[in-house]
Image: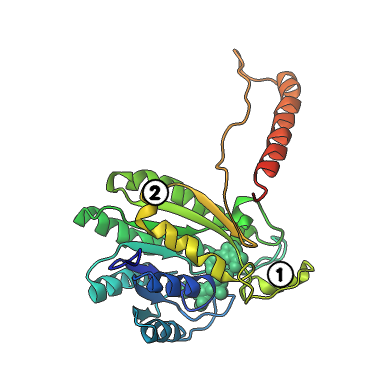
Amino acid sequence: MSSLKDKVAIITGAGRGIGKESALFLAKEGAKVLVNDLGANPDGSGEDKIADEVVEEITSLGGEALANYESVDSYEGGKNIFESALNEFGAVDILVNNAGILRDKTLFNMDESDWDAIMAVHLKGHFNCTQPFVRYIRETNRLNCKIINMSSVSGLIGNFGQTNYGAAKAGIAGFSRSLSMEMAKYKCSVNTISPGAATRLTIDLMKAAGREVDENDWKQGPQQIAPVIAWLSSEEANEITNQIFHISQGNVGIMQQPAVIKSFKSEDVWDLDKLNMVMPDLIAAKKMHDEQVEKKGEPS
Ligand SMILES: NC(=O)c1ccc[n+]([C@@H]2O[C@H](COP(=O)([O-])OP(=O)(O)OC[C@H]3O[C@@H](n4cnc5c(N)ncnc54)[C@H](O)[C@@H]3O)[C@@H](O)[C@H]2O)c1
């Protein structure tokens, strides 16, 4: 039996890249898929009905899918994406917030529109598409739904030239942590992906970093992310929530969450001399922690 038989999934930005591979994988596992994609250029401009091609591919393989061309960057768009899935398939179980764009520039050179566009598609896009779904879960008391959000190393670690994108992707991790608490009552899991895959958004960056890129090699391409999204959508993952999974170069890993590593207590208000004393210990503890985590995180 297929692991996602009769489940209904909404995947945003599923016309290409990670979203497309995930739509094909979930459909192969038996899910009915709403394939949303605006058909935008990498910077978010333009529109195209590329979602149709993914729907054709799914239906030609015997699956069920519906195309949707709304933009996730508007509140109405998010509502319409959810309602078209509900109207077509009668229920919704899985939401993959995947649509994304880039406007890479250092903060020195960034226009206000570069900041706003990234926030609108990524961070507000998550809000726009998720709110109709969580309201539906509450109203219908639908249990064991899944929400999978798309963060990035840029937001979780940092990346030069991506203050806008990094801020939005860090915001998505924060959104996911708080939402997982709100959705626990409905046994709805909320997990976050930090992907590393050769797609049109990253191929040039990878080449600039001196890497040889072959997007058809599964260890490099978006096809390595799709099975993890499918697994997190399955019943096997019912108890897995509030986690960040990093998938890159054929490896799948779990990431740490922010936590206090070491602390000092003061009986009186901190003064500069006391801070001079404790700060070197805090920095040393952090360095040791980073070294341990780096070793532990190596693929086994
Ligand atoms: N590829 C990576 O290594 C990587 C790394 C970190 C994060 N991500 C994130 O993964 C997600 C998928 O990226 P990808 O690499 O597959 O890129 P991609 O460009 O191949 O796919 C993104 C899709 O989103 C669609 N889209 C853009 N704006 C939209 C909007 N407003 N409404 C609906 N659809 C829209 C595009 O048309 C495109 O088809 C993005 O959120 C991206 O930020 C990717």
Residue 63 position within the rendered picture, expressed as x and y whole percent measured from the top left? 34, 79
Mark earlier in primary sequence (1, 2):
2
The answer to whether the residue labelled 1 contacts the one labelled 2, judged by CB atoms less than 8 Å apart, is: no
Q: How many other residues sit within 10 Å of disc 2, few (<14), some (14-19) or many (≥20)?
A: some
The residue that appears at 36% across and 50% down in the rendered structure is: 238
Structural distance between the alpha carbons of marks 1 and 2: 32 Å
Which quadrant of the structure image shows residue 214? bottom right
Residue 300 position within the rendered picture, expressed as x and y whole percent measured from the top left? 64, 49
The quadrant of the picture showing ligand 1 is: bottom right
Identify which residue, 167 or 1, lies in the foreground: 1
In the image, what residue type sits under mark 2? Leu
Which residue of the protein is positioned furthest toward the left in this rendering?
Answer: 140
Determine whether the beta carbon of the residue marked 1 sits less than 8 angstroms from the nearest atom of ligand 1: no
**Residue 100 left/right relative to 53:** right
Give the vertical position of 7 relative to 257 (above or below). Answer: below
The residue that appears at 68% across and 35% down in the rendered structure is: 289
**Residue 4 left/right relative to 296:** left
Mark sitting on residue 243: none
Quarter of the figure that contains the N terminus? bottom left
Residue 254 position within the rendered picture, expressed as x and y whole percent measured from the top left? 55, 48
Q: Secondary structure at mark 1?
A: helix
Residue 227 in sight: yes
Label 1 sits on residue: 205
Residue 161 position within the rendered picture, expressed as x and y whole percent measured from the top left? 70, 62
Q: Secondary structure at mark 2?
A: helix
Label 2 sits on residue: 179
Q: How many other residues sit within 10 Å of disc 1, few (<14), some (14-19) or many (≥20)?
A: few
